[in-house]
Image: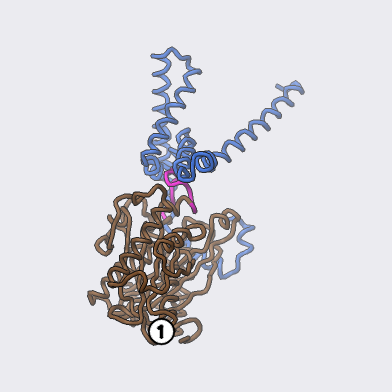
């Protein structure tokens, strides 16, 4: 907890929080990192396999094979999410499944499934980006800022 | 009658003439499965939304409780029900089906004992003869409202709890045979400044401790008076904190009688359960199912149930508010 937040708490609250914290199981961070490393790596290996498949059999170039590869991974994730398997894998794998494109596909698919009961427009349409929305908003915004910086540097003749 | 600072003693000893517990697929795999009147294999209960499924749970719990008492809906004067959903819709909709005069109540996961205390108060004060109490929660409906979509793959920490899919109902009357409600201690709202919704046990433990201490102080009782003292849904994390905190305050409850509904309802190795069960349905199904069954069998004579509730909303959490908690204790005796 940040220092600013701690200042607002009374001594009794601080004492209790220390008391409680000593009795809580901690997140197994090292184990989680190892799991995430191997699962994340495995997803990349599968992605690489799919890419090579597209290059070998469908005459894609190394670069243009990227798009269909991502699409295949997204479809696989959406299917696993729909069948209710993905969240169980993710509870075990942690960041391993959330960081790759699989995580992004899962946020959209899971929100869409959950809000299906409210209809296709207000439910699915309105809530699909509930979790993915911030990623897109700040992704696009930071890309915009970086582009402006690049343009300025180029105009100044630095790059 | 008020005794001490915040405890009601019911002199007429209102009777829980019948009770019912309805559960979902995860509860069916738990160790208390035999104590449920109805268990559903289908998470959706044949409905097209989780919210409707929760309403169905309540309807079935209420109907089963009324049927077990050989009564009709018309014999019940009031229904007190609550749940975790926005505007407590499942309760209101189940009340629409039953057509019984209805009072909606909310105390988060403490609602079951809040309802039982209020129902006993109505019966004890002769404002009603038969009052039905019902609370429910549905895992997917709660997850959807409070946390992330059901199928979202975020890793939960070991302190997180699993919301019970279930509903418990109890019919409190001024006559008949059965376990009696003898006293109730209404809790204060306690806030220790915790903010993590994946660690509700630690947030609610101080409220449970405060109410337990008030109960024994007001009634001048010793914990050995009870065969079982059960907290509502503190889970393994919160229950341990509460036990240690009570010891620190000089109130030592023997480990063999101090338990928690959230620990009892699931096996420790059940996937996804982590620190234990939670939700309005947790204390309700465990008390109205498991504990009352054991009392009727004569295995338990006196129990104290302290249902704990975390009074947060998804909005208050996002606005960085801490999680205030409340706990209500009800003593049930044969």
Residue B106 image position (x, y, % from top left)? 49, 66
Over which residues does the magenta segment extend? B145-158
Where is residue B268 shown, x and y percent of the image? Answer: 31, 57
Which quarter of the picture shows residue A37?
A: top left
Number of marks in the rendered image? 1
Is residue B250 visible from the viewing direction of this image?
no
**In percent of the image, x 36 and y 74: which residue is there?**
B75
Q: Is residue A82 visible?
A: yes
Which residue in the rendered view is the most extreme toward the front? B74
Relative vertical location of residue B229 with respect to residue B135 in this rendering, above or below: below
**Can you identify the residue that label 1 sits on?**
B10
Q: Which part of the image, by quadrant, shows the C terminus of chain A?
A: top right
Of the 4 image quadrants, the one containing the N terminus of chain A is: bottom right
User: Chain A in the picture: what colour?
Assistant: blue
Question: Magenta includes B146?
Answer: yes
Majority SS type along the magenta span: loop
Residue at the location (45% across, 52% down)? Answer: B143
- Residue B181, x across and y down, in percent: 36, 79
**Residue at the location (37% across, 86% down)?**
B12
Circle 1 chain? B
Which residue is more in the foreground, B164 or B70? B70
Label 1 Cα neighbours within 10 Å, binned few <14 / some 14-19 / many ≥20: many
Please state which of residues B293 and A7 is positioned toward the viewer in this rendering. Answer: B293
Q: Colour of chain B?
A: brown
């Amino acid at each position: 907890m940040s220092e600013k937040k701690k200042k607002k708490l009374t001594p009794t609250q601080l004492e209790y929080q220390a008391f409680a914290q000593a009795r809580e199981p901690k997140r197994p961070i090292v184990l989680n990192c190892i799991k995430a490393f191997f699962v994340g790596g495995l997803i990349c290996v599968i992605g690489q396999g799919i890419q090579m498949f597209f290059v070998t059999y469908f005459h894609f170039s190394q670069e243009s094979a990227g798009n269909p590869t991502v699409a295949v991974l997204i479809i696989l994730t959406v299917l696993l999410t729909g069948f209710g398997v993905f969240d169980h894998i993710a509870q075990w794998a942690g960041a391993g499944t959330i960081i790759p494109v699989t995580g992004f596909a899962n946020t959209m698919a899971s929100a869409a499934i959950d809000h299906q009961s409210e209809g296709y427009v207000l439910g699915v349409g309105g809530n699909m980006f509930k979790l993915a929305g911030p990623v897109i908003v700040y992704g696009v915004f930071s890309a915009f800022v970086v582009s402006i910086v690049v343009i300025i540097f180029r105009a100044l003749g630095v790059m | 009658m008020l005794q001490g600072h915040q405890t009601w003693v019911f002199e007429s000893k209102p009777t829980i003439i019948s009770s019912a517990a309805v559960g979902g697929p995860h509860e069916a795999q738990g160790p208390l499965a035999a104590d449920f009147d109805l268990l559903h294999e289908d998470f959706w209960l044949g409905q097209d939304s989780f919210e409707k499924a929760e309403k169905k749970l309540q309807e079935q719990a209420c109907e089963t409780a009324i049927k077990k008492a050989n009564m009709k809906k018309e014999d019940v004067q009031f229904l007190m029900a609550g749940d975790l959903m926005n505007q407590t819709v499942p309760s209101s909709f189940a009340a629409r089906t039953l057509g019984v005069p209805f009072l909606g109540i909310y105390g988060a996961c403490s609602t079951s004992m809040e309802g039982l205390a209020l129902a006993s108060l109505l019966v004890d004060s002769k404002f009603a003869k038969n009052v039905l109490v019902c609370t429910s929660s549905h895992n997917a409906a709660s997850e959807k409202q409070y946390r992330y979509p059901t199928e979202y793959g975020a890793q939960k920490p070991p302190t997180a709890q699993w919301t019970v899919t279930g509903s418990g109902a109890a019919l409190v009357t001024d006559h008949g045979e059965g376990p009696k409600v003898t006293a109730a201690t209404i809790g204060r709202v306690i806030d220790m400044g915790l903010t993590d919704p994946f660690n509700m046990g630690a947030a609610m433990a101080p409220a449970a401790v405060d109410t337990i201490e008030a109960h024994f102080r007001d009634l001048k009782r010793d914990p050995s008076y009870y065969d079982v003292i059960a907290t509502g849904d503190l889970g393994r994390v919160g229950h341990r904190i509460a036990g240690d905190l009570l010891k620190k305050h000089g109130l030592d409850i023997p480990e063999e009688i101090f338990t928690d509904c959230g620990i009892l309802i699931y096996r420790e190795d059940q996937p996804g359960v982590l620190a234990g069960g939670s939700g309005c349905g947790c204390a309700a199904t465990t008390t109205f199912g498991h504990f009352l069954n054991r009392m009727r069998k004569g295995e338990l004579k006196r129990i104290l149930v302290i249902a704990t509730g975390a009074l947060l909303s998804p909005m208050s959490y996002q606005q960085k508010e801490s999680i205030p908690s409340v706990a209500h204790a009800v003593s049930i005796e044969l």
